Amino acid sequence: MELNKLLEIARTERFHTKPIQIRCCTAAGCLSSNSQAVKDNLDASVKAAGLEKRLQVAGVGCMPLCYQGPLVQVDNQENLTEAKFYEKVIPEDATKIISEVNGEVTDLQKVICISHFLLVNYLFS
């Protein structure tokens, strides 16, 4: 494939990507800890909050901390220095996670780290 075609595909993908990506681990370890229900509740919470145009929830593969699962990662493309990584998420946490993404303060105490740099260091140290 030619470089120009690849660049065109990348531009198209970026254009259609929502500004905030929420990734819920749906690999075997997290699935055994009910991550599918977490993802389903995240989807429902996004819809209930009317944030479908800004937020996208996706089930993803292993996020290397199976013993801390289910895991949820929030990436904000509007602020690339910020990421939130939640551990031991239960389905009932979904509403609070979406509230936090929407700028509200909650009592949820499951954030491991709040930056890509810290996350990479945490995962690979």
Image (cartoon, grey):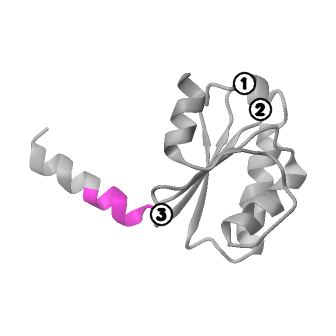
Rendered image: mark on residue 79: 3
Residue 101 vertical placement versus 57 (above, below): below
Q: Tell me if mark 3 has few (under 14), some (14-19) or many (20+) residues whose alpha carbon lies within 10 angstroms of its own.
A: few
Q: Is residue 22 visible?
A: yes
Gap between marks 1 and 3 measured at Cα: 27 Å
Q: Residue at x 84, y 55 (%)?
A: 108
Quadrant in the picture for residue 3:
top left
Camera-side residue of 6 and 94: 94
User: Which stretch did the figure color magenta?
Assistant: 11-18
15 magenta-colored: yes
Rendered image: mark on residue 111: none
Residue 65 screen position, x and y as percent: 68, 26
Residue 48 screen position, x and y as percent: 77, 73
Tag 2–tag 1 contact (CB < 8 Å): yes
51 magenta-colored: no
Looking at the rendered structure, the kind of residue marked 3 is Asn
Q: Quadrant of the C terminus?
A: top right
Q: Between disc 3 and disc 2, whose residue precedes?
A: 2
Residue ID for mark 2: 69
Residue 31 screen position, x and y as percent: 77, 31
